Amino acid sequence: MSGPLQRKIIHVDMDAFYASVEQRDAPELRGQPVVVAWRGARSVVCAASYEARTFGVRSAMPALRAERLCPQAIFVPPDFSRYKAASRQIHAIFARHTDLIEPLSLDEAYLDVTLPKRDLGSATAIARDVRAAIYAETRLTASAGIAPNKFLAKIASDWNKPNGQFVVKPVMVDAFLAPLPVAKLPGVGKVMQGKLAELGITTCSDLRRWPVEAMEARFGRWGRRLHELSFGIDERPVEPERPTLQISSEDTFATDLHLDALEPHIRRMAASTWTAYGREWQHRPGRLARTVVLKLKTADFHILTRSLTGPEPPASEAALADTACALRERVELPAATRYRLVGVGLSGFVEPDDSPLQDDLFG
């Protein structure tokens, strides 16, 4: 009797996607340090070309800092309609090879090619064909990682960037992961990295030497998960139709504001979120979001969130806005604190249960 098929997963990641679209469409930008962002004190970097990255410019960096790092940078305002159009072309190419496609964003996705539509001989050959088609049809480059699971494929896609690919075969997993810094593991940020370093854990090989029970005792279920990842264990399937986990809208102000001045902005973000919620309802009728989330960013870039899961989901835009405004009462910072950003979100989705509220919500 034959056992289950070994999964073959490809992680495709476009190279500096937004910036590359801009360079493709404007030849004078090619070879130049391009920063996709609006200029101004409140703006952040959406993307940076590889030429700009050599100066230390990175996504999510304040635009003013990017300008200091690279004074010669060419700032281009983002045009998401063009990025979405390119993304649709790219996903159509994925669909030629498999229906098991899990998009992570406009510019990256997992593909399960265990049983591909086109037999090209190997997952490595499929990745090469996908990348070639992307370049031929969009004039954009992509990198790819090929591995027996999603975790390894994502790490591998970064190995030969830009415009390259790397394969981690099952027999390579142990040797590939042993010297890998724990900072490369998903979810290990600077704080967790520091906690692990205190235990003498800086690589996956170090992590493997700790009993899984000890890791779980210190870090809970996350400790067990890290231990599994150090051995390359990741059983998550590629999920073509991932349910929405959160819908949100946020805005950065022209000038920093006190908490008591945020109500009109919170209500404006609530209206935008409610509109997006309506679109989600059309796609997946009956799924209700039970949790309201208020997100704030202080003038010194400290992020805080407050949330409330009530006995009933918010039944209207006004109810969403009222709850989000009320969540300000749970912000414990001094009254003099100023805020540069506000966001309103909905999360905690539950599946349909044919309640009367569901029939009437967007009727």
Image (spheres, grey):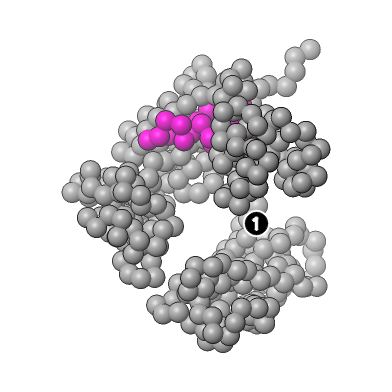
- The answer to if 155 sits in the magenta stretch is yes
Q: Is residue 320 above or below residue 84?
A: below
Q: Quadrant of the C terminus?
A: bottom right
Q: Is residue 309 left or right of residue 147?
A: right
Residue 274 placed where, x, y %? 59, 71
Residue 58 placed where, x, y %? 39, 52
Q: Is residue 9 left or right of residue 4?
A: left
Q: Is residue 109 left or right of residue 55?
A: right
Whether residue 252 is visible: yes
Badge count: 1
- The answer to if 78 sits in the magenta stretch is no
State the residue position of label 1: 245
135 or 160: nearer the viewer: 160
Q: Is residue 347 above or below residue 148?
A: below
Which amino acid type is marked by label 1?
Leu
Q: Is residue 337 left or right of residue 225?
A: left
Q: Determine the image quadrant of residue 154.
A: top right
Local SS, label 1? loop
Q: Residue furthest bottom?
A: 260
Q: Determine the image quadrant of residue 98.
A: top right
**Residue at (57% x, 75% y) in the render:** 270
Residue 189 placed where, x, y %? 58, 49
Whether residue 9 is visible: no
Q: Which residues are magenta?
A: 143-162
**Residue at (56% x, 72% y) in the render:** 296
Q: Quadrant of the N terminus?
A: top right
Mark 1: give few (<14), some (14-19) or many (20+) Cα within 10 Å: few
**Residue at (48% x, 34% y) in the render:** 157
Residue 225 placed where, x, y %? 71, 40
